[in-house]
Image: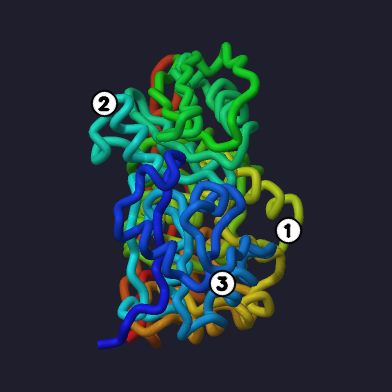
């Protein structure tokens, strides 16, 4: 059995006093100890080897750790190294048999313990170095959120986002330096937030309370068109729900949204699960800018946007598990490129409003098989002093799975 050369030790704000004898021994016996300046200070009394502070960019630090393979190396991490920590980064490069981990209580565990919140019922997310827009899908009535921030400005930014989105009555509890001698816990209403001198090391606990008209995102596909910024080029709500059902997202999959328009399909694809990713391809600069704004407003800022014309813009993209063709499908080479790029077992869904695109889909159905479906909707609208049905333009949809 391979003897571990790397030990990852989770350390809290209480320093060495909060560590087990095994953790202290791992630090003391290491030839090299890596960590942030704060971690190295907390463990200074136990370090006998060479202390090495993290480099910038952080990828250089990973390389520095790997370069010391074969020596006794210790890495200091905050709390639980495998909960939004460096453990996940190192495990991509180091065989688990070559390292051992001694975790400490995470900031999320400490926060839940202080508040009496069952951790399994809480939305826990890290906004450290990430866009705070990621919190938006979690803004549901009576939801409880634990959000790790980047710095002393994070709590105020969160309070402002809550207020601007209609959640100004939510309670924001700022928990600073948890587990250490300088631990502080302060609560304020988001719309009245005025805390100063916030410790850069903080976590925000949020009790969500929406006001009337708050931007609460429903949990099912087919979000209200009014939630999106668009110029009319949007897959309408009911058709979008049926389209997403046909695309059938599964964890860790990638979607290409060709001719993305407002980005609604890719956005709702990513909202279905945090592991999903979407690439929106849109040639119109104004619509591309609109997609970026929509992605942030829906809490999926990680959506990839390619400003370019299909099929030329598709050549360097990661192969998709699913493709939606909503615009430009009748342009030469687009459907051929989409079919060629799709992974085996992947799903392709294309919608046609025009006769030209419908002809393309009918031809593809004849040669490739799959399903050809006609989607027709009507809405009740005023008709004189009464009401009547006003049909929307019918949609021809081709659904195909690559063998």
Q: Earlier in the sequence, mark 3 or mark 2?
A: 3
Q: Residue 214 got which mark?
A: none
Q: Is residue 256 above or below residue 403?
A: above
User: Secondary structure under badge 2?
Assistant: loop
Residue 252: image location, x then y, percent: 38, 66
* Residue at image mark 1: 284
| Secondary structure category for the residue under label 1 | loop
Dot 2, crowdedness within 10 Å: few (<14), some or many (≥20)?
few
Residue at (32, 83) in percent of width and height? 3
For disc 3, the neighbor class at 10 Å (few under 14, some 14 to 19, many from 20) is some
Mark 1 residue crowding within 10 angstroms, few (<14) / some (14–19) / many (20+): some
Task: Measure the C-alpha gap from mark 2 to mark 1.
Answer: 50 Å
Would residue 290 appear left or right of 90 to someone viewing this image?
A: right
Residue placed furthest toward the top: 192
If you read the primary sequence from the N terminus, does the residue marked by circle 1 or circle 3 appear first? 3
Residue 116: x percent and y percent? Answer: 26, 26
| Residue drawn at point x = 46 percent, y = 50 percent | 78
Quadrant, the C terminus = bottom left
Q: Which residue is mark 3?
A: 62
């Amino acid at each position: 059995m391979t003897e571990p050369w790397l030990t990852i030790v989770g350390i809290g704000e209480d320093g060495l006093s909060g560590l087990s004898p095994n953790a202290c021994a791992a630090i003391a016996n290491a030839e090299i100890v890596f960590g942030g300046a704060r971690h190295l200070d907390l463990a200074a009394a136990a370090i006998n080897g060479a202390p090495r502070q993290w480099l910038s960019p952080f990828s250089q630090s990973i390389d520095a750790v790997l370069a010391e393979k074969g020596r006794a190396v210790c890495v200091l991490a905050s709390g639980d190294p495998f909960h939004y920590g460096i453990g996940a980064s190192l495990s991509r490069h180091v065989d688990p048999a070559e390292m051992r981990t001694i975790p400490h209580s995470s900031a999320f565990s400490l926060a839940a313990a202080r508040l009496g919140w069952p951790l399994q019922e809480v939305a826990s997310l890290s906004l450290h170095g990430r866009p705070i827009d990621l919190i938006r899908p979690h803004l549901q009535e009576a939801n409880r959120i634990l959000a790790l921030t980047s710095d002393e400005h994070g709590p105020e930014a969160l309070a402002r986002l809550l207020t601007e989105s209609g959640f100004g009555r939510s309670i924001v509890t700022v928990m600073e330096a948890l587990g250490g001698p300088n631990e502080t816990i302060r609560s304020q209403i988001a719309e009245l937030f005025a805390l100063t001198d916030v410790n850069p090391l903080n976590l925000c606990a949020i009790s969500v309370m929406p006001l009337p008209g708050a931007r609460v995102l429903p949990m099912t596909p087919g979000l209200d068109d009014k939630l999106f910024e668009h110029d009319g080029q949007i897959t309408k709500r009911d058709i979008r729900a049926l389209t997403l059902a046909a695309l059938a997202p599964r964890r860790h999959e990638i979607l290409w949204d060709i001719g993305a328009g407002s980005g609604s399909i890719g956005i709702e694809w990513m909202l279905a699960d945090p592991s999903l990713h979407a690439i929106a391809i849109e040639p119109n600069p104004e619509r591309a800018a609109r997609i970026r704004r929509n992605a942030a407003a829906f809490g999926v800022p990680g959506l990839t946007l390619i400003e370019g014309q299909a099929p030329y813009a598709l050549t360097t993209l990661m192969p998709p598990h699913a493709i939606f063709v909503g615009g430009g499908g009748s342009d030469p080479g687009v459907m051929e490129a989409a079919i060629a790029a799709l992974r085996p077992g992947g799903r392709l869904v294309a919608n046609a409003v025009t006769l030209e695109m419908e002809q393309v889909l009918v031809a593809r159905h004849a040669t490739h098989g799959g399903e050809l479906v006609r989607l027709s909707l009507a809405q009740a609208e005023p008709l004189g002093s009464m009401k009547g049905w006003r049909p929307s333009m019918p949609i021809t949809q081709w659904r195909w799975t690559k063998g």
